[in-house]
Amino acid sequence: AQSVTQLDSHVSVSEGTPVLLRCNYSSSYSPSLFWYVQHPNKGLQLLLKYTSAATLVKGINGFEAEFKKSETSFHLTKPSAHMSDAAEYFCVVRLSGDTGRRALTFGSGTRLQVQP
Amino acid sequence: GAGVSQSPSNKVTEKGKDVELRCDPISGHTALYWYRQSLGQGLEFLIYFQGNSAPDKSGLPSDRFSAERTGGSVSTLTIQRTQQEDSAVYLCASSPSPNSNQPQHFGDGTRLSIL
């Protein structure tokens, strides 16, 4: 079975300071991992994805994430927060070669607040 | 359009009425998913379509919920005899194929409110 745990339901940072959103996963097989962002009243937008290539993945808007197999983690980071980064962030795991319900597991989300 | 399109963006209806939610996926995407997002919660899988194969309906919460996908493109999610607990944002997503490394592209959702 696979699962995703987002360790913080809410993170607050000051504008210009680093962002760290934590995600741990559990999967018996090689997973694909994704981070999505959801702004208010909007759908989910893909930030970045890991699919067994480079372990450090760069995404849009200056975000990046590092896949650490030994720690089963896929934390999302950004060197300097911007006010526009305030949103809900979802970590998602997907098993290789699987489809349907069993294939995609969403974390419960982390709400990022950016203070001026 | 370039993205997944959902309509209506907002729907308010009375308890007991039927509602239809529409999803127009990205052209050429064979996989289509419906999710439900209740207030302050993550995404709950509802149903999955892949090409002409039989859909995976394992996430539908009750027999009041049904969905179809005509011609491998547009999909409609129908909720019959709506209840207040059906109030949520219903999100549709599509992907080029069901392969694991293909991300899903989401629409902006339909916000459903049952009075």
Image (spheres, rainbow, N blue to C red):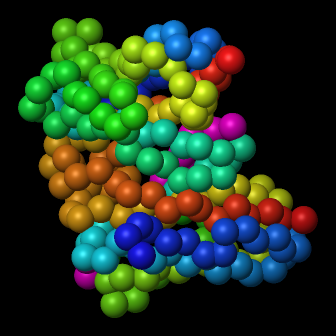
Q: Quadrant of residue A92?
A: top left
Residue A54 in percent (x, y) is at: 11, 26
Residue beneath the point at 28% across and 71% down: B29
Residue at the farthest bottom position: B71
Q: Main secondary structure of the magenta part?
A: strand
Residue A101 in percent (x, y) is at: 37, 52
- Left or right: A57 with respect to B84? left
Residue beneath the point at 25% across and 29% down: A58
Residue situated in front as seen by the camera: A47 or A62? A62
Query: Which residues, given as a range, are shown in magenta?
Result: B40-52
Residue situated in front as seen by the camera: A62 or A51? A62
Whether residue B56 appears in this view of the structure is no
Residue A46 in percent (x, y) is at: 38, 45
Residue A63 in percent (x, y) is at: 36, 27
Residue beneath the point at 90% across and 65% down: B115
- Left or right: B2 with respect to A89? left
Number of numbered labels in the structure image? 0
Which quarter of the rendered picture does the C terminus of chain A lie within? top right
Which quarter of the rendered picture does the N terminus of chain A lie within? top left
Residue beneath the point at 76% across and 71% down: B11
Is B11 included in the stretch rendered in magenta?
Answer: no
Whether residue A13 appears in this view of the structure is yes
B68 shown above or below A70: below
